[in-house]
Amino acid sequence: MFDDELFEERAAVMEFDGGMARKEAEAKAREDLHRCEVQWCIRKFFPDGIAMAAHLETVERRRGKPAADRLRVDLRKAWKEQGAKQCR
C-alpha cells in the first residue's frame, strides 16, 4: 500500500529528527506504516468482510504471503476490537 518513497521519507525523519540509528529508524518506520495500513483497512473495509478478503488477496499477490499473513493477523485483532466498539 505504501510506496518506497514514503518509507524512505519516514525513516529519514525518524533518523534525523528522532535521533535514531538508521536501522532502528527503518524498523520503526516499517512498524509505523504497518500500523497505519491496519487502521486504513479498518476505516475502508469494516464491516465488509468480503471486500477485506479481496484486498488481502491483492496484498498477497503483490507483496507475498508473509506480508499478507502479517496484515491478516493484525487485522483480525483490529476487526474484533472495532466490532466490540460497535456493540457498545
Image (cartoon, rainbow, N blue to C red):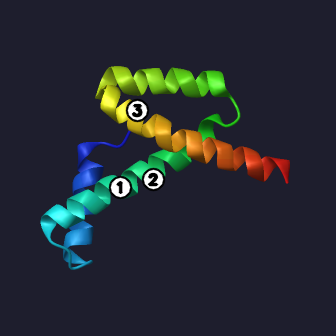
Asked where in the image residue 20 lies, by quadrant, the reply is bottom left
> Which residue occupies 84% across, 48% down?
87
What is the distance, in whole Å, between disc 1 and disc 2 at their CAs?
6 Å
Where is residue 64 shown, x and y percent of the image?
30, 26
Q: Mark 1: which amino acid?
A: Glu
* Disc 1 secondary structure class: helix
Q: Are marks 1 and 2 in contact (CB under 8 Å)?
A: yes
* Disc 3 secondary structure class: helix
Q: Mark 3: which amino acid?
A: Asp
Q: Outermost residue, right direction?
A: 88
**Vertically, is 83 above or below 88?**
above
**Vertically, is 2 above or below 88?**
above
Nearest the viewer among 8 and 32 is 32
Where is residue 82 shown, x and y percent of the image?
69, 48
Observer-side mark, 3 or 2, equals: 3
Where is residue 80 shown, x and y percent of the image?
66, 43
In the rendered image, is residue 43 in sight? no
What is the distance, in whole Å, between disc 3 and disc 2 at their CAs?
14 Å
Asked where in the image residue 61 lies, by quadrant, the reply is top left
The residue that mark 2 highlights is 35
> Which residue occupies 26% across, 70% down?
14
The residue that mark 1 highlights is 31
Q: Mark 2: which amino acid?
A: Arg
Q: Quadrant of the C terminus?
A: bottom right
Would you say 31 lies left or right of 13 here? Answer: right
Asked where in the image residue 58 lies, by quadrant, the reply is top left
The residue that mark 3 highlights is 69
